[in-house]
Image (cartoon, rainbow, N blue to C red):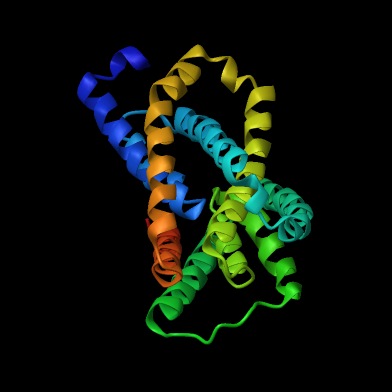
């Protein structure tokens, strides 16, 4: 597989991952959304999914080790059990039905919410703690169905956490937990016994490290308003991609 990639292909992949992990370093999610379509031009999907899961997990671990004390573990404690339950429900739906319409509905919701957040100034208000149930459960369902539950956690946490750095590391920690689950599944399925995937991960590792470092640097220099604008723009792109997938 690696021998089929030219130096030009590798450079394009490295630049794509660098940009994707700038976004991850800033927002704590969104790397697969950006990197996946480009990597699919050069690598099979069966390689991309476990590869990005492994790199995402490494990125999350680096962020947590650096800033883990800033995470809001109260919110994490409530969300993780709901994410697990939602993921089990999502897996069951995936095995028994066609979840296409659910993808469309989620995409419309995400796009409309992001447009509302970007275009209309809202009064500063906190989400009710009770909203953890729909956001945690539905986020888990769609993580299992489409690998795209991260922006739902971002919507919820943005309504619960005022400090942008606390939001970022809390979001990263949640994504790390979700990714760890997938990595364990791939490990037991024997995917990571394929040496080429590990070799690709090592080749792409410097782009990820540089990207999350620069993303964190940008975040520290941003005002909260600009930072949330970045978050909602990524949510809007996520929703648009889900809508496109349905009609495509």
Residue sitting nearer the eye, 103 or 47: 47
Identify which residue is drawn at 71% across, 78% down. 128
Residue sitting nearer the eye, 195 or 78: 78
Identify which residue is drawn at 39% across, 62% down. 222
Q: Quadrant of residue 18?
A: top left
Q: Quadrant of residue 183?
A: top right
Q: Is residue 47 above or below residue 246?
A: above
Horizontally, residue 67 falls left or right of residue 195, namely: right
Where's residue 243, x and y in %? 42, 63
Residue sitting nearer the eye, 199 or 215: 215
Q: Is residue 212 above or below residue 155?
A: above
Horizontally, residue 48 falls left or right of residue 42, namely: right
Identify which residue is drawn at 49% across, 75% down. 113
Where's residue 144, x and y in %? 63, 48
Viewer can see residue 98: no
Q: Is residue 153 above or below residue 124?
A: above
Q: Is residue 244 above or below residue 88?
A: below
Where's residue 196, x and y in %? 46, 15
- Going by the picture, which residue comes out furthest to the left? 8
Q: Quadrant of residue 163?
A: bottom right
Viewer can see residue 130: yes
The quarter of the rendered structure image containing the C terminus is bottom left
Total number of numbered discs in the rendering = 0
Residue sitting nearer the eye, 218 or 54: 218
The quarter of the rendered structure image containing the N terminus is top left
Identify which residue is drawn at 58% across, 62% down. 152
């Amino acid at each position: 597989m690696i021998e089929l990639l030219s130096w030009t292909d590798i450079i394009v992949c490295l630049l794509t991952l660098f940009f994707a992990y700038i976004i991850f370093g800033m927002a704590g999610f969104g790397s697969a959304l950006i990197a996946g379509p480009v990597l699919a031009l050069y690598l099979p999907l069966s390689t991309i999914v476990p590869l990005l899961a492994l790199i995402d997990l490494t990125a999350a671990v680096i962020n947590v080790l650096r800033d883990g004390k800033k995470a809001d573990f109260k919110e994490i404690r409530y969300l993780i059990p709901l994410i697990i339950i939602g993921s089990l429900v999502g897996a069951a739906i995936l095995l028994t039905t066609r979840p296409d319409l659910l993808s469309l509905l989620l995409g419309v919701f995400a796009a409309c919410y992001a447009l509302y957040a970007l275009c209309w100034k809202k009064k500063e208000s906190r989400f009710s703690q009770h909203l953890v149930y729909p956001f945690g459960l539905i986020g888990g369902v769609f993580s299992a169905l489409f690998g795209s539950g991260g922006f739902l956690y971002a919507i919820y946490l943005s309504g619960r956490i005022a400090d942008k750095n606390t939001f970022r590391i809390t979001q990263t920690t949640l994504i790390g937990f979700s990714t760890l689950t997938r990595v364990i599944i791939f490990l037991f399925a024997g995917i990571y016994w394929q040496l080429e995937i590990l070799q690709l991960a090592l080749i792409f590792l410097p782009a990820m490290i540089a990207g999350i470092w620069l993303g964190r640097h940008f975040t520290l220099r941003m005002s909260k308003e600009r930072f949330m604008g970045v978050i909602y723009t990524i949510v809007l792109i996520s929703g648009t991609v889900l809508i496109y997938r349905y009609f495509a």
